[in-house]
Image (cartoon, grey):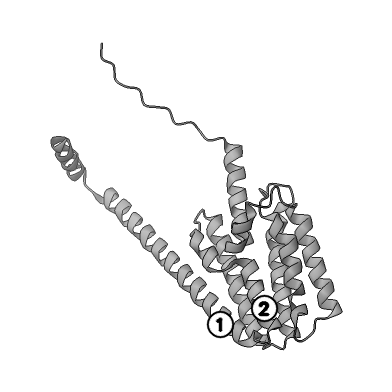
């Protein structure tokens, strides 16, 4: 006797496992790691606990800022080196600890403080530093807002945005070489165009898709019973 083949049952995902996966993905997105972190994260073993390491980095950058940085020279790279050495090894962790949600704000605070400390020490225009912090802050806000609605930014944005590590390296090297103001100007303009254009186009695309879905649903509701029956009959005849 020929029997109808039974379809393979799709296993139901474990709710707790799915929650942990989403939490990890969100926190990693909020970190805003760039290509350098991704290149090294697989070679760092288990890595450092994210919250303690990032907190130590923040406190160390605060201490260096209070002590004072020179207006030029390689010592301007000290905040960058501290942040890289302490925060980069935290990337391999799954960020599922009770307090691991603190990692992104600690990291963003460390990045902003290092930017400002280096910029002020090297004599960069304050308004330019403010604009750069605003642009990166907007990108962070946009990422948080999207992921909370299960709308994930494309992965290429985080690589194109250079990540916190390359942004700090570029600023530190520019300051050490005495070129900080033009470096800041180019970096800020690049990030502004990248984040603004990508964000606007993504939201416009989403609005169009939502409007089209709403129009299709409204059209289905407005269809008369006769039209629905005729459409169903036509589809049955074609089958």
List the single residue furthest toward the top.
1
Q: Position of residue 83 (x, y in %)?
A: 73, 66
Q: Viewed as shown, does residue 158 lie left or right of 8?
A: right
Q: Position of residue 47 (x, y in %)?
A: 71, 51
Tell me the residue that label 2 is attached to. Answer: 173
- Identified at 55% across, 65% down, the residue is 142
Determine if residue 110 is in view.
Answer: yes
The x, y position of residue 20, in whole percent, is 62, 44
Around disc 1, counting alpha carbons within 10 Å, would you say few (fewer than 14), some (14 to 19), or many (20 or more)? few
The total of numbered circles placed on residues is 2
For the N terminus, give its image quadrant.
top left
Label 2 or label 1, whichever comes before in sequence order = 2
Secondary structure of the residue carrying tag 2 is helix
The image quarter containing residue 112 is: bottom right
Displayed quadrant of residue 64:
bottom right
Q: Is residue 34 visible?
A: no
Residue at numbered disc 1:
186
Q: Nearer the viewer, residue 6 or 120?
A: 120
Name which residue lies at 76% across and 72% down.
79
Location of the C terminus by quadrant is: top left
11 shown above or below 121: above
């Amino acid at each position: 006797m020929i029997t109808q083949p039974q379809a393979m049952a799709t296993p139901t995902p474990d709710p707790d496992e799915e929650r942990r996966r989403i939490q990890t993905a969100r926190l990693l997105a909020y970190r805003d790691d760039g290509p350098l972190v991704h290149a090294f994260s697989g070679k760092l073993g288990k890595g450092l606990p994210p919250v303690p390491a990032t907190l130590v980095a923040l406190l160390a950058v605060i201490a260096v800022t209070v002590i004072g940085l020179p207006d030029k020279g390689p010592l301007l790279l000290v905040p960058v080196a501290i942040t890289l050495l302490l925060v980069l090894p935290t990337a391999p962790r799954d960020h599922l600890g009770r307090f691991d949600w603190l990692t992104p704000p600690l990291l963003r605070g460390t990045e902003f403080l290092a930017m400002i400390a280096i910029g002020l020490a090297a004599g960069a225009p304050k308004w330019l530093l403010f604009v750069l912090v605003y642009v990166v802050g907007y990108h962070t806000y946009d990422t948080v807002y999207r992921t909370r609605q299960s709308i994930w930014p494309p992965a290429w944005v985080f690589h194109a945005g250079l990540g916190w590590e390359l942004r700090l390296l570029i600023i530190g090297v520019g300051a050490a070489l005495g070129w900080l103001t033009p470096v800041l100007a180019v970096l800020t303009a690049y990030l502004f165009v990248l984040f603004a254009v990508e964000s606007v186009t993504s939201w416009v695309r989403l609005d169009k898709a939502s409007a089209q879905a709403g129009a299709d649903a409204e059209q289905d509701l407005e269809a008369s019973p006769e039209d629905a029956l005729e459409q169903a009959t036509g589809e049955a005849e074609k089958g």
